[in-house]
Image (cartoon, helix red, strand yellow):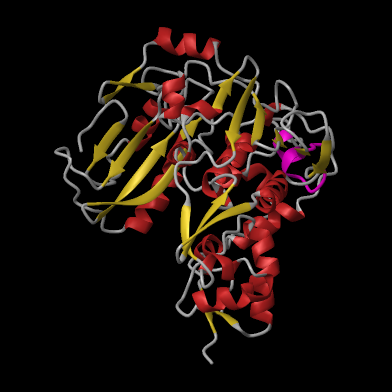
Amino acid sequence: MIETNRIEFKRELTRELDLEKEVVAFLNYREGGIIYIGIDDAGKPVGVLDIDGDMLKVKDRIRMGISPSPMGLFDVTIERIDNVPVIKIFVASGSEKPYYKNKYGLSEKGCFIRVGSAAEPMTQGQIEDLYAHRVRNSLRNIRSSRKNLTFRQLHIYYESQGHKLNEHFMENLDLLTDTGEPNYVAYLLADENSTSIKVAKYAGTDRDVLIANNELGYCSLLKATDNVLDKLHVENNVSSEITYKRRIDSPLWDERAMREIVINAIVHNDYYTNEVPPKFEIFSDRIEITSAGRLPIGMSKEEFFSGISSPRNKELMRVFRDVDMVESLGSGMKRIMEAYTKKIFVFMDNFIRLTIPFHSYKASKIVQDKNSTSSHKNSTSSKKEFLLAYCVIPRTLAEMMHYMNMHSRYSFISTYVNPLLKEGLLQYTIPEQPTHPKQQYIAKQK
């Protein structure tokens, strides 16, 4: 590995390391970038002694030392390079440029931008030009049309991840305007709102005959997203080709890629300009997903397809990442491109549409015939037994959901995990702390 315009190496995290400068430079750069801690200047991984402690310090320094708020625009994870654990800080390009170090404000000492493989100070002219074009029309600054909002669903999603929201959660999650009123982000995440997300199904290849029109919104955007994922999972009918001792199962679309497509359509939808939620339409030969908005200013299609991230709604992105509905910034496009080609994307003046012909993904899943685990897993009467058999060794919630091919954490917990725990057939590995972030589950030994 070598340092580039999008990659920066740091040997270790110290007080002397100007981490904030490097992050600010990537926030102000149109492509964002990645900072590795635990790699020397020669590109050799040397590791990090206290990796968990340093990750917490990194998050705190970025959160507290930079303005405008970078929350939702960075991701801190562990990556193994040559089997050596290092810290990876993914930084997306921000939409509220110029970003700056709080200590020095909008000055040449506070504003930086990536030039080649270095973070360089911005000139006063650059700072003034970016400030004049700053995008201020964010959801955070729009007042909610309703004031009496409740957030029970939001609390449930955070608690499922072992996080408990305190009394200041609206301030911490940027759900308030500068005047302290609930904003449009709060409205979208509230238990009740007027945002309708529709999944329509037609009899043929056009919109002449509508056979189903499911309204899956009017609730927290988190729950609405899960509702859409569950509905599409049901609609993803499997056709089979029987061969000698094998059955080739062909779902209509790739489930893993579809999850990314749905979440991207909802999280990156332009609610500010159009106030039009994304829509999902199923035809006899294809599925179409249409979301409001265009490519971010200054981003080319090639940069878009390469996975360069510039979240339109950083507050929503932050919440979706907190509850583990988004794995990491910049990873979604890679998963989509693993299954499909660029041809499924259509860019319009005010909308982006994905048209996915059925069975068009790059690989079919081959499974054994009568005794196949897929067939067994899809049997309603045996799903719990199938899950328990998988949990003969400790499993995380994410592993269990992936194994059962379920996307809705809330539905999975309420349908399988809680009943099995109540019956005593499934047990916590950390029973004294049910919401512990490292909690796992194991089947009770007979």
Depicted 155 relative to depicted 321: above or below: below
Q: Is residue 188 magenta?
A: yes
Residue 147 sits in which quadrant?
top right
Question: Residue 93, position in %: x, y?
Answer: 45, 27
**Can you see residue 214?**
yes
Answer with left or right where residue 121 lies relative to residue 232: left
Depicted 371 relative to depicted 102: above or below: below
Q: Residue at x 80, y 37 (%)?
A: 196
Residue 295 sits in which quadrant?
top right
Q: Residue at x 66, y 71 (%)?
A: 416
Answer with left or right where residue 236 lies relative to residue 391: right
Answer with left or right where residue 167 lies relative to residue 216: left
Image quarter hosting the N terminus: top left
Q: Is residue 271 magenta?
A: no
Answer with left or right where residue 116 lies relative to residue 236: left
Question: Residue 203, position in %: x, y?
Answer: 78, 38
Question: Residue 404, position in %: x, y?
Answer: 57, 64
Q: Nearer the viewer, residue 323 or 245?
A: 245
User: Which span is picked out in magenta?
Assistant: 184-200
Q: Residue at x 20, y 48 (%)?
A: 45
Q: Nearer the viewer, residue 4 or 355?
A: 355
Depicted 375 relative to depicted 273: above or below: below
Residue 419 sits in which quadrant?
bottom right
Q: Nearer the viewer, residue 272 or 248?
A: 248
Depicted 21 relative to depicted 327: above or below: above
Q: Nearer the viewer, residue 256 or 80?
A: 256
